[in-house]
Image (cartoon, helix red, strand yellow):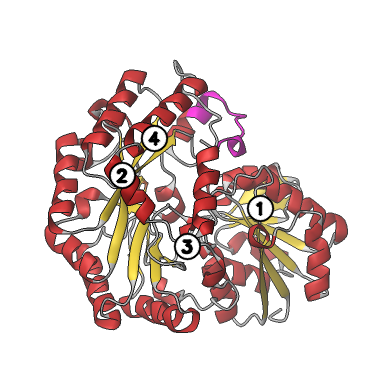
Amino acid sequence: MLNKKIVLVQPSDLLGRDLFLTQPLSFEYVASALLLAGFKNVFFIDTRIEKISPEQLPVILRKRYGTVDFVCFTIFSQYFDSVKEYARQVKAAWPNIVTIGGGAHAILEPEQTLRLNRYLDFAFCGEAEESLPEFIKNFNFKERYKDIPNLVFRQDGRVIVNQRKFLNDLSECPNIAHELIRPDIYPAAGTGFIIAERKAANLIATRGCPFNCSYCGATQISGARIRVRPVAQIINEMKLIYDKYNIREFRFLDDNLTFDRGFILALVKAIDDEFHGQIKWACPNGVRIDRLDPETVMAMEKSGCYYFAVGVESGNERVLHLMKRGGLVRSKPYMKKQIEMIKQYTKIKVVAFFILGFPGATRQEDEESIKFANELALDGVSYHIFSPIPGSDEWTRLKKDNPDIDSSAFTTYRVTYAAAGRSIREIKFLKLKAFLSFYIRPRIIWETLKCIRTFGQVKLIVKRLMAM
Ligand code: SF4
């Protein structure tokens, strides 16, 4: 079994919505786990980077690897139909290849993932680092399938979803797959628009989020318990990327890097001790603003942190309450004070996320968000139009009333949903208004222009603007 050929395939969005060309970190950890488990033939194809269509995929698989045993796809909701087409083409060319789906959508909608995509043989409804190697080793023993955590499979015409299991100890999953998924082939502005260097590598130091905001699927995907990687392991990974790929910028894609104060202080001290200001790092996915204090932000900046995002989400406290924003982040004065605190003690750039068109929010309340954003000491804003993310409370609520709703239709990048009483047209107009009223200001224009490092970055930004 250890000689089986396993190809991990990052699909392209066939509707051209690949606005964020990020390094597929989840695949890096899965590939690492397979290599550590002793599998010798693990390969990776990013169809977005290589511009490989579904028709070309089987041809390329054959040309590069001769025969292939397992093809694994990662599925975000917006990629659902694309994965179906890639898997269909693979199966048409090679019916005996085993096709597997994993990633956020398979975790959040496991039954639907197999039911609506008959070209996938199996799926994983949880972290696959332990389960996938176990499954491939036991592939010939069908009677064992029911005991493999996170496995989703068909039996007697039914889809069976096994019990979910989170990894207990992240130290068992170091990222050793950089040669397979090279960080230097991805654009630095793959996430967010602010970059400090021409090249950047993404990594993850923690998993989990205990807050469960009603629009977010993070808690369902990674669990409510914060799990952290050992600091020494993170530093080793950064050192390897620094030395081997000459990369000087790192982007932590955690949901909640600063949740554990002891951990973040230990991590930034270790980064500072190791790199002595020779690197820059950022958190484009956001940190909780209520987990920051002067000592933490100053230590972060000293170790090279130059930018992070925070979730403000709304300028109306009733809406923040509807969003189930926990604790102090429901208070506008508190969030304003926290952003001022960051600016008082550091020069870290702060970008805030806002959601427009949230179910129950009125147009007037969204206008308050636009006004609030312009009052805050921010360097950037990112307005998202509400989209029901599978696994989130909002999604569950919506699905209760519409059991056949198709989750792949919703994406954060194109507006396909308007809550009752609102229209897509009106919310899109508000988003444009919000964007222009924030960015068409001399200081913001100047600060934004200063962030431009590469032509590729400009192209990605323009593509995202066109998709607004
Ligand atoms: S929005 Fe942020 S804080 Fe809220 S559940 Fe998601 S990751 Fe956690």
Task: Check disc 4 and report its element: helix, strand or loop.
Answer: helix
- Asked whether the residues under the numbered discs 4 and 2 touch, taking CB atoms below 8 Å apart as contact, a structural biologist would say no
In the rendered image, residue 450, in percent from the top left (x then y), is placed at 35, 55
Residue 355, located in which quarter of the rendered image?
Answer: top left
- Residue appearing at x 41%, y 42% in the figure: 216
- Residue appearing at x 33%, y 80% in the figure: 232
Whole-number angstrom distance, CA of label 3 to CA of label 4: 23 Å
Q: Which mark is residue 12?
A: 1
Q: Which mark is residue 314?
A: none
Q: Which mark is residue 435?
A: 4
- Magenta includes 399? yes
Residue under label 3, please give it: 188
| Of the image marks 4 and 2, the number of the one nearer the N terminus | 4
Q: Which mark is residue 444?
A: 2
Whole-number angstrom distance, CA of label 3 to CA of label 1: 19 Å
Image quadrant in which the N terminus is located: bottom right
Disc 2 or disc 3, which is closer to the eye?
2
Disc 4 or disc 1, which is closer to the eye?
4
- Magenta includes 210? no
In the rendered image, residue 263, in percent from the top left (x then y), is placed at 25, 68
| Of the image marks 2 and 3, the number of the one nearer the N terminus | 3
